[in-house]
Amino acid sequence: MRKSEFLKHLNHLEEQDLRDELSMLFDKITQVREHYKMDLGSVKDRERVIAKAKKDIANKYATKSYRRPRRPRIQKVNTIIRDLDKKDLLDFEMIDIYLFNTECATYLMNEYRFHSQPLYNTIIKSFTKALLLIQGESSQSEQEERCQKILDDIKDNSELFSAIINEYMETFDREEYDH
């Protein structure tokens, strides 16, 4: 069914029929339920969703062995973030998620001396997305300290992360990065 046909169908329905249709969609389709939960829900509901996502992301990076650290589950982290992106989170909430993902990945890289190209790509991708959202939100002052901490954590690998260092300098109007 095309959107135009669907709109014609909706125009022919009366108000009570529309309410019944929405109620049926809410009961049957989980995406509709999630949309209204995020859109109409309380701040506590949103915080609960974000806290659960952060816990899940941290678990995907968790490892115990310094000698042979477990590979991070980057595909699963990306799935968690993609699902969150679909849930109508606000930009500042997504900034928090992207920066948290970057912090977890840099912690794994530094603490366990785990180096891999997928991990580097995750750090670059998450940090870049966070910086783009920070520019869009004009929230540089609120996030600058956190971004500076991430850059301090990756300073030993500055040649690998030169692209995000340049992006950082553009976002926060810096002449040079002091590391």
Image (cartoon, rainbow, N blue to C red):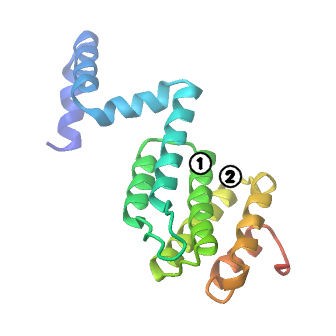
The residue beneath circle 2 is 137
State whether residue 129 appears in this view: no
From this viewpoint, which residue is outermost toward the bottom? 159
In this view of the protein, which residue sits in the foreground, 125 or 9?
125
Mark 1 residue type: Asp
Vertical arrangement, residue 78 with respect to residue 70, above or below: above
Q: Which mark is residue 91?
A: 1
Judge from the rendering whether residue 113 lies leftward or rightward of residue 52; answer left or right: right
At label 1, counting other C-alpha atoms closer than 10 Å, the crowd grade (few under 14, some 14-19, many 20 or more) is some
At label 2, counting other C-alpha atoms closer than 10 Å, the crowd grade (few under 14, some 14-19, many 20 or more) is few
* SS at circle 2: helix
Q: Percent position (x, y) of residue 39?
A: 48, 30
> What separation in Å lies between label 2 and label 1 (alpha carbons)?
7 Å
Judge from the rendering whether residue 8 lies leftward or rightward of residue 164; answer left or right: left
Whichever of callouts 2 and 1 sits on the residue coming sooner in the sequence is 1
Q: Percent position (x, y) of residue 60?
A: 45, 58
Judge from the rendering whether residue 70 lies leftward or rightward of residue 16; answer left or right: right
Q: Percent position (x, y) of residue 31?
A: 31, 37
